[in-house]
Amino acid sequence: MEMDGSPEQGTWYWVLGPAGVGLVVLPPAGGWGRATAAAVLEGLGAAGIRDVDEARVVEAVQAASGESVTVAPPQQPRPRDGWMAVAVDLDGMRAQVRVFPPQGGRPLTVVKAEGVLRLAGVRAGIDRRSLAEAVEACDPLHPVVVARGVPPQDGEDAQVEFHFRVREGPLRPAETEDGRVDFYNLNLVENVKAGQVLATKTPARPGRPGYKVTGEELPARPGKDVGLSAGQNVAVSPDGLTLTAAKDGHAFRGLQGRVTVLPVFEVRGNVDLSTGNIDCVGSVVVRGNVESGLRVVAQRDVEVYGCVDGGMVRAGGDVLVKRGIQGRGRGGVEAQGNVSALFVQNARVSAGGRVEVGEAIMHSQVVAGEKVEVRGRKGLIVGGMVRAGEEVSARVVGSPYSTPTQIEVGVDPRSRQELAELLKSLAQASTDLEETRKGVRLYQEAEKAQGSLPPGRREALLRLLRQQSQLRRTVAELAERRQRLEAEAREQAGGRVKVSGVVYPGVRIVVGTAALTVRDEIPRASFSLSPEGEVAIGPL
């Protein structure tokens, strides 16, 4: 048998049978094309086959059924060795073979089959086991895939993982555990500590090229790189793959993708529902107001250019409020350091150091570990309570209307506050003890009158006796602690109240543990503790 043309032009072969020369035309599939009558006739002639029925050849080619069709009388064509046809897919990723049996010649060998593959241009991805099996089976009706290409594997783009919350889009309120939306907490500030890893980068991978069965290389798309840029107070690792905070502060990623840590977080307007509460490990600057119900917490200093207007400010350092603190009965300022404000009204203010007010303290609770000073043209303290460990100074204290106003100095405010809370606890425990004693007496009188108590009432009496014993111990412990605190207060007493203008009636001044209620106006005076343990009035 001979075959002219390539697999794309169709695959056919002839066989010898009792009825004559049979023609087998295989159907087109995959890389195998459709045979033509002209090519088949030319091939049969080249094989020395005579008396060919051309009409039968045309019918067999058109049918392409893979079955033998007799096209010539019995004869003996030239002997032919076994052979192999190769078809490569259009994309070059697969090669198939058909192995044909010999006709009076030698069968195809694996070595010759490999040579046929080379001649067909197949040089890569050859599966020699499949090729050997195809040669051994020698079944032209079932093509065998003997070579496969490898598609390219594109590279992986570089990836950056941020280890802090990177804000994308508008602020969103936090959701509480019970599913409610908390519009006061928008998580605007992302606090980080020095040494904290902020971002890590996984480098891009180049990818792996592939190839066709012809050996042609298929390039891979390399992975795209992604920049990792460090801004202020951010350290870059030697390999450029890790960003670390160099300071405590607020971390954020800027418009250019640069990661920055700032020790001062700035709110350019008001702290309101558009920002939510602010909680920062560094300092905070608010260019506007701290609105009602909102909170600013900083581990360092807080500076407010406007007012604290019903909001709350807590700082581990100093607090400066350039306009004033309007507490509205629920807001105020707490600072471990000093507090400065233009005025304080209806607010709670506490400072570990000094409280300095430019104009007035009105109807507020103000506590300072060191001094409270009210300056300015008014220099007014009226209503509420002002407490300082060392000194309170003002121009006017109280009002012509005898507004109740209390000034306390000479004792650490924390100790005085502890004593006040202890006195409340002691009073409550004493009341509970007296009520328990009454209950015990009632049960005991009933037992004495009846001779015995029913089991239930007996158990109730035992519970009251245990409660009475516990309350006695509690009262004794609280009383002892009270005595110690009062003794410490007497030892610490040495503060002073200074008034450069007038003190009005209705003002109560406490120095240490001594107290004085002002009955008449007192001009320009200082108040301190006398050797006799009383509040003494003296000149400035």
Image: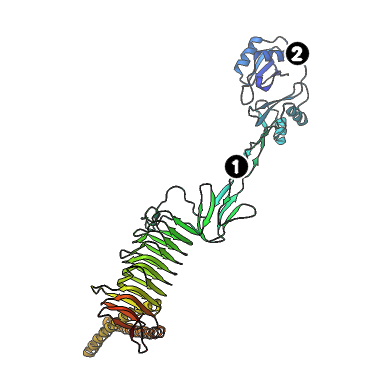
Q: Is residue 440 visible?
A: yes
In the rendered image, the quadrant that contains the C terminus is bottom left
Where residue 60 sits in the image (x, y, percent)? 63, 15
Residue at screen point 57% across, 47% down: 159
Residue 263 position (above or below residue 360): above
Q: Which mark is residue 224?
A: 1
> Which residue carries the number 2 mark?
48
Horizontal side of 157 relative to 300 (left or right) equals right
Mark 2 surroundings: few (<14), some (14-19) or many (≥20) residues within 10 A = some
Q: Quadrant of the N terminus?
A: top right
| Type of the residue with mark 1 | Lys
Q: Is residue 368 visible?
A: no
Closer to the camera, 32 or 44? 32
Dot 2 amino acid type? Gly
**Is label 2 in contact with label 1 (beta carbons under 8 Å)?**
no
Q: Is residue 51 above or below residue 386?
A: above
Crowding at mark 1 (Cα within 10 Å: few <14, some 14-19, many 20+) = some
Residue in view at x 38 percent, y 52 percent: 274
483 sits to left or right of 519: right
Q: Earlier in the sequence, mark 2 or mark 1?
A: 2
Q: Secondary structure at mark 1?
A: loop
